[in-house]
Image: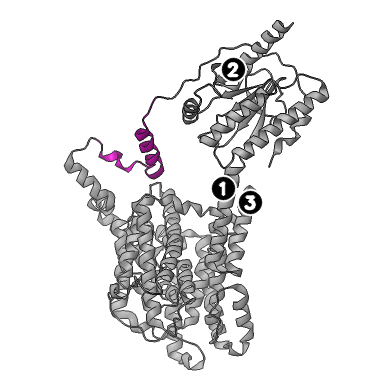
Amino acid sequence: MEPNASNSLQPDHCLEITPMEVHKVVPPPHRSTIQKLKSRLKETFFPDDPLRQFKGQPLGKKWILAAKYFFPILQWGPNYSFKLFKSDIVSGLTIASLAIPQGISYAKLASLPPIVGLYSSFVPPLVYAVLGSSRDLAVGPVSIASLILGSMLKQEVSPTNDPLLFLQLAFSSTFFAGLFQASLGLLRLGFIIDFLSKATLIGFMAGAAIIVSLQQLKSLLGITHFTKQMELVPVLSSVFHNTNEWSWQTVLMGFCFLVFLLLARHVSMKKPKLFWVSAGAPLVSVILSTVLVFAFKAQRHGISVIGKLQEGLNPPSWNMLHFHGSYLGLVVKTGLVTGIISLTEGIAVGRTFAALKNYQVDGNKEMMAIGLMNVIGSATSCYVTTGAFSRSAVNHNAGAKTAVSNIIMSVTVMVTLLFLMPLFQYTPNVVLGAIIVTAVIGLIDIPAACQIWKIDKFDFVVMLCAFFGVILVSVQDGLAIAVGISIFKILLQVTRPKTLVLGNIPGTDIFRNLHHYKEAMRIPGFLILSIEAPINFANTTYLKERILRWIDEYETEEDTKRQSSIHFLILDLSAVSSIDTSGVSLLKDLKKALENTGAELVLVNPGGEVLEKLQRADDVRDVMSPDALYLTVGEAVAALSSTMKGRSSNHV
């Protein structure tokens, strides 16, 4: 924690300090409490200053700008052309070929009727096309949110024993997920999802991908009695304790289609121009397997099929939402967790592809768009949806220009719901399992994990905690463990800020870390420290103990060398962005402690907020006497060295 503990081995050198001009530390301009509060709130909730476009505009223009702000389709819609439409229709049809089999598969992953997955690929994309700000985001169900929704609800309600109640709770959870997401955007609270660090997400996604894949062993092996638990040990135990239920026909079909899907994915990864290979492979697999099952009557030989699906568009479901009763806590908790995860994934995917095409995605708009499409979706028989990475990647590679590609996809799904549902009656579940496994494999990012190991070992530990927490404990508990460790890391950085001992680089007025710059030298009689964090109640005790220890080490070293003891403690506050009353008390206590030893406390370059608070608290000049406040360390050392020489001359 303290890399500078070895600095006591540094020899002292007598340096000749060249006199220099001393600049006055100027207090910040006066601002009222209301002005400060307004500025702080603006920087906290409106860092992008969305209202700047309204300044100086007539009332009519303001209404138009407001409409465009809340409905991004009004920005690009008037300039939409047939050329753009040709690109978007290709992209829309391509992602529809992926969305249809994935929608059915992910609904089964959430323990919901397969038709709900198609419903969720129809209404939400239409809502997002109007409200969303990303050109590339393809909306629909995603594997991780489906897994979490199903696993959390199954803890209290069985989807087989009480399917209607389970469906009602799924729609209710979707409503609360959307309400939470939209509230974050409306109240400008998007920074909350920033607590899911990159390391946390990589570990969580990898663990969830493995759990999702293991769950598909039921379909891939043809097991009928499978555990309801999601963790690694119970799932593997269930697999190997039911080997008598394995169906060789199912295993053979699953293996063949899994190899086909993985090869298609590999081809598209190696040659991005062949994106259509992996995009169309799931639909080809569904069609081919359905034909095989129908032709050979394979359902009579141990291969389970989806069964008959109802036709028609989304029925209303607002009357199925639960806002009271014993399950209210469950749906709120499920909505909160799935809302955070799906929102994080959607915004991350949107920003990724926006960066590739050099345009901006407004995070708060995305939160409102994703939230509203889930609220509306919950009333139209849809469950949690967001921007899916696999579909968005296909959408991007297919040349999507605007959100019209989502509308094309939605229309294609609508046609499927109206006219093509009987064709899926003989679709085998094993192929849906293979589609899910292929989709989630991309969530395991080994190169990113290796990069985290190289950069930050603590982040790597956080990543591992998320990974093992998900596969060994539970999906939501694994995420909670990783977030808790990340917050602990932040608290550790706040409560144990870095303090550095500075030395002078010979021939300059530059002062740098003695441990970092070997040529840096100490100035006899001076102990120069840099505090590199805000000073507040959480770290004042630590800072006081650490600074007093620096002083003791300095004094011990000087006594050993029989040289002059400390005369000035210089605190470089350049990196201290803020201070509270406990921090002010710390400086007062340090000044008193130093006065008892005949030394003085000197402050260098306090920021505007720090200087203002010190001025208010320093009525009797307890800390900030005019000769103990300097703009740079170099000026402080030069001026105080002259003072030391003058005192020595007078003493002689």
Q: Residue at x 53, y 67 (%)?
A: 475
Residues in magenta, as a range: 29-55
The residue carrying pointer 1 sits among few (fewer than 14), some (14 to 19) or many (20 or more) residues within 10 Å by Cα, namely few
Q: Is residue 157 left or right of residue 116?
A: right
Is residue 417 rendered magenta in the image? no
x, y percentage for residue 629? 55, 20
> What residue is shown at x 55% (from left), y 65% (from top)?
477
The quadrant in which residue 388 appears is bottom left
What number is the disc on residue 635? 2
Residue 214 quadrant: bottom right
Please, what is the dominant secondary structure of the magenta stretch?
A: helix
Above or below residue 24? Residue 219 is: below
Residue type at tag 1: Ile
In this rendered view, identify the residue nearer to me: 25 or 247: 25
In the rendered view, would you say 8 is above or below 103? above
Give the CA distance from mark 2 to mark 1: 34 Å
Residue 152: x and y in percent read: 48, 72
Closest to the observer, 79 or 348? 348
Is 195 on the left-hand or right-hand side of 488? left
* Pointer 3 local density, CA inside 10 Å: few below 14, some 14–19, many at least 20: some
- Label at residue 490: 1
Give the residue displayed 30% in from the left and 41% down from the top. Answer: 51
Residue 356: % across, % down: 44, 50
Q: Is residue 297 left or right of residue 455?
A: left
Secondary structure under tag 2 reads helix
**Spot occupied by residue 431 in the image (x, y as percentages of width and height):** 48, 79
Residue assigned mark 3: 458
| Amino acid type of the residue that numbered disc 3 sits on in the rendered structure | Phe
Type of amino acid under label 2: Glu
